[in-house]
Image (cartoon, grey):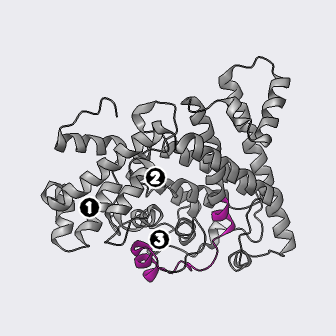
Amino acid sequence: MQLNTFAVNPSHTRGRLYPEIPTPYRNEFQRDKDRIIHSNTFRRLQYKTQVFVNHEGDHYRNRLTHSIEVASVARSLAGALNLSEDLAECVALAHDLGHTPFGHAGEDALDECMKNYGGFDHNAHSIKLLTSLEQRYAAYHGLNLTWEVLEGIAKHNGPLTGKLPEAIVNYNNIHDLKLKEFSSAEAQVAALSDDVAYHGHDLEDGIRAKLFNIEDLEELEFISGYIAKIRTQFPGLPYGQMIYEVIRHLTHSLINDLLEVTRSNIKNYGIETSDDVRNLGKPLVEFSSQGMSYMMRIKDFLMRKVYKHNRVTTVAFKCKHVVKQLFELYMGNPELLPFEWQNSIQVGKETKARIISDYIAGMTDRYAIKEFQNFYNLTFSNF
């Protein structure tokens, strides 16, 4: 595929913190992808919550399947725009590596525990994992990814200003990620692919969990149009297939909207180089105002019907309790930590609270529950 002039060509990467000899059979972003998917952190995503905790069912999304779905959307969008599919895929696969057990409930609990110690941010923790905590190679700590992949992850929510998380500041001091600039077009594609993916699959999982039904979705008139069309075309379609068809239509609609607006931006702003993208002063990759309205209305629907549903909030309450109790336990009894984590505290590598936070953030849902049970001898039969 011939890349656009403003795409990030893997042969022109800004490089790695620790220079390495290129491999003859992979470009640099393909090499990064392999490092990401072979990491311990990536494998642990299989047992980390997206919305529903692992024990609730085998077919609900987890952080791993979510990341794979985001990467799939990102590759499709990048290919349609003649961008580097490999770079977009890397950023998508790694964007959630820093998530705690129990999804956003776990993150909120850990951030509250760390409020006097600099807080907790899963995006910053992703950078810390990729640049320090993952220890597989003899020559360095971290995965030594390319500048462009780390930039895209650090700026997942856009340019960074104001007071920044310590992990990002520390790495940026030795490998300047140009935090105040917008990221590459590929990284912007990955960020919005995250929105497309989770809006669709959280609707599907919410229906699967019987938190709402297809008829409830008809309050969103743009989705009710898809439902009517599918019923006309496929009368008597089984419920499960109906759900999938509705989400498929919605996803295609959002992707087409994003492509149309982005192509218009490329033309209207005369984008020719990757620097043009970074210095535009606004996102190049974006939805139309109508597309954004659809996304906001879906988010509001999910908030009312799924995220604030008592079944979900009840489990979230228990999950937060697990995280907070484990944090307090380790703060008061650091000798309960594995030896290597105890040693980090003893040598003063970082504050005790930050080391404990890093340890808890790395736990899977089931490991956190197991540790909680081990120390408190409680039954989670109804967890």
Q: Secondary structure at mark 1?
A: helix
At label 3, counting other C-alpha atoms closer than 10 Å, the crowd grade (few under 14, some 14-19, many 20 or more) is few
Q: Which residues are magenta?
A: 163-189
Q: Are marks 1 and 2 in contact (CB under 8 Å)?
A: no
Name the front one of labels 2 and 3.
2
Locate residue 184, reporting x and y percent: 65, 70
At label 1, counting other C-alpha atoms closer than 10 Å, the crowd grade (few under 14, some 14-19, many 20 or more) is many
Q: Residue at x 52, y 58 (%)?
A: 95
What residue does disc 3 label? 20
Question: Exactly how many numbered labels are in the figure?
Answer: 3
- Residue 109 inside the magenta-drawn segment: no
Name the front one of labels 1 and 2.
2
Q: Earlier in the sequence, mark 1 or mark 2?
A: 2
Question: What is the number of the mark on residue 104?
Answer: 2
Which quadrant: the N terminus? bottom right
Q: Residue at x 78, y 36 (%)?
A: 224
Image position of 211 with respect to 157: above or below = above
